[in-house]
Amino acid sequence: MAERLLVEGAGTDSDIRQVAVMFVDFAASPQRRVRAHRSRSSTGSTGAFAVLVEILDRHGGIVNKFIGDGFLALFGAPFEVDDAAHHAVGAAREMLAAMERINSASHWPLRIGIGVHFGEVVRATSARPGRKEYTVIGDTVNFASRLEALNRISVRSS
């Protein structure tokens, strides 16, 4: 993806495109967060991150931003992908299965929350001196974020 962006460029123009947006976040109980902070060990989540990103790559998605304990992924941006929604849902399902496998071999299981939505986004590259940032905005992005947030509510109540 990086090589393709270097060759083709991302430009600084904005446009509207149909994109599948995915938010993924590691959900943990407050007790787990305290233990992780005390031990300063993030080996489990780091390894799981790598697995999830590899799955994302295989399904044609890209990580747009790492956000705290998770990330924002896109299917169909910055480059078009045929059947982006299908690829996003396939990646989400495979991520959930991978987490089950990872957790079956762990004494400290990790949960992930995933929110996926497909629709129009405004995509743009903002440029500042020494830095370019590709982003997507719109109701589709907001809705996918809210879907993922619903997973956090269910973790807290369980």
Image (cartoon, grey):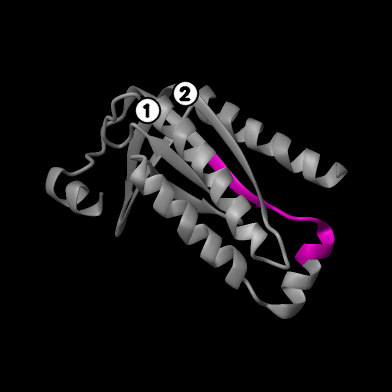
Q: In the rendered view, would you say 141 is above or below 34?
A: above
Is residue 157 covered in magenta? no
Where residue 133 sits: x, y (%)? 36, 48
* Most distant residue in the right direction: 157
Is residue 26 covered in magenta? yes
Q: Nearer the viewer, mark 1 or mark 2?
A: 1
Where residue 82 sits: x, y (%)? 29, 25
Read off the residue under disc 1.
84
Q: How many marks?
A: 2
Q: Is residue 93 left or right of residue 111?
A: left
Q: Secondary structure at mark 1?
A: helix
Give the residue displayed 41% in from the left and 26% down from the top: 86
Depth check: 77 or 81 in front? 81
Where residue 45 sits: x, y (%)? 60, 63
Q: Is residue 34 left or right of residue 68?
A: right
Read off the residue under disc 2.
118
Give the residue displayed 62% in from the left and 51% down from the top: 100
Q: Are marks 1 and 2 in contact (CB under 8 Å)?
A: yes
Q: Amino acid at mark 1?
A: Ala
Q: Amino acid at mark 2?
A: Phe
How packed is label 1: few (under 14 Cα within 10 Å), some, or many (20 or more)? Answer: many
Give the residue displayed 30% in from the left and 37% down from the top: 78
Cα distance, mark 1 to mark 2?
A: 8 Å
Q: In the rendered view, would you say 36 is above or below 137?
A: below
Which label number is shown at residue 126?
none
Depth check: 156 or 104 in front? 104
The stretch of residues the image draws in magenta is: 23-33
Give the residue displayed 65% in from the left and 76% down from the top: 41
Q: In the rendered view, would you say 49 is above or below 133?
A: below
